Amino acid sequence: MDFDTLIIGAGAAGLICAAQAPGKCLVIDHAKAAGEKIRISGGGRCNFTNLYASAENYISSNPHFAKSALARYTQWDFIDWVARSGIAYHEKTLGQLFCDTSAKEIVAMLLKGVAEAGGQVELNTSVQSVNAIEAGYAIQLNGAQGSRSVTARNLVVACGGKPIPKMGATDFALRLAQQFGIPLTQTYAGLVPFTFSGAQQEAFKSISGVSAPALLQTNGTAFEEAVLFTHRGLSGPAALQVSSYWAPGDLLTLRLLSEEGLRQAVRDAKQTEGRKSPSSILARLLPARLVPLVLHDLTLPERIADLTAAQLDRLTERLTQWQLTPAGTEGYRTAEVMVGGVDTAALSSKTMMAKTQPGLFFIGECVDVTGWLGGYNFQWAWSSGWVAGQSIKVGL
């Protein structure tokens, strides 16, 4: 064999796997630089993990699958590596850890780990074909060294999913799985903004750029973070989180204020500022530009003192249970992740190797394990890549 291990994909999962893999290892990627998604993530500062990462923060057809990898290589293990590498970091919010200076430091740390393990990284190189041979794989490559065939005892598929095609993302990992008879689960764009149509889109367009703290819910799953109104629909952390649980036709329920807080504010205003308009009172509780949009089809009196119980009930329903039906999402063009992928039933949770295809591993985003927003997907890449690297066998 030319190599003990060939890894397709020089991203987060592929690089940490190569830093662990024994023997002669080659990482190939069709991009011109390694770790490109790491570099652009988190506004260029890379939200590299989350202090609270656990299996509960992931979507999968088998919610237990991720437990083994996440337990064997935890967020604390990666944080320790970051600290030992002299990379300064900080917690931003909700356990999210970011580099103080640049995501490039994480890429450099990973590449140093690959080099120290004796691995090679070959960029501007694409895979033309993969075939199983006796005790390994023959991979046809095309790149800077021209077209050539190499052999490897182990093959690790770490080339991600479909999001952000302009960066070169493809469904290659899924097609390769199918080639070897490995089943897939349904895939769709996750952590992605919602789009609306018609009057609702026009309304949101009129307040594009306005954000507010909110609770957004769909299908029994809710997230309490900021929402951002855009010229096409709804974005912000809460919307991105909920999008991974949404299906076309499903309702969103938006809570902009708590019922108790709203009713108390109205009671207080009636007693002390009865002549003021409902909109002026609400402008203290919500972004001013948002208030007319929320109230546009509600018939309210000019004075807050004249607000009836029935009108308050309708106002409360609008501000605590605003029902919205998106037309769709922005899709893979802007999605941060692909939900679904290589069926976990076909993989070993302890090694990430295919049960029916010895020496073939799938790690990172291409697997049907999708994290929440906030560093969880990077942690899955570190954990799944690490356990695969630790599980690779060399020699006879």
Image (spheres, grey):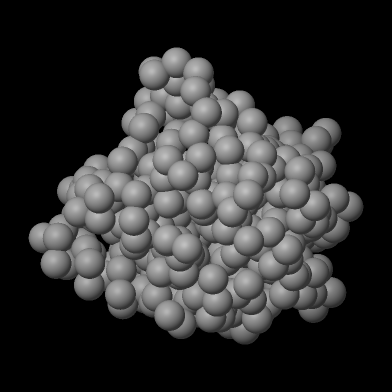
At 34% from the left and 49% from the top, the residue drawn is 24
> Is 193 displayed left or right of 322 in the figure?
left
Q: Is residue 145 visible in this depiction of the protein?
A: yes
- Image quarter of residue 356: bottom right
The one of 189 and 6 positioned closer to us in this rendering: 6
Give the side of residue 305 with respect to residue 39, left or right.
Answer: right
- Residue 331, image quadrant: top right
Q: Residue at x 43, y 51 (%)?
A: 4
Q: How many marks?
A: 0
Q: Residue furthest left?
A: 86
Residue 28 image-quadrant placement = top left
| Residue 243 shown left or right of residue 213 in the figure | right
Q: Which residue is at 37% across, 59% downward?
A: 21
Whether residue 192 can be seen here: no
Q: Along the line of sight, which residue is nearer the eye, 289 or 36?
A: 36
Q: Residue 351 at what x, y percent from top left?
A: 54, 71
Percent position of residue 313, x then y: 79, 74
Residue nearer the viewer, 159 or 375: 159
365 versus 349 height, above or below: above
For the point 60% across and 74% down, the residue is: 349
Percent of width and height locating residue 162? 64, 40
Q: Given the current orientation, which residue lies at the most extreme right position?
A: 249
Q: Is residue 293 above or below residue 52?
A: above
Residue 135: x %, y % from top left: 59, 54
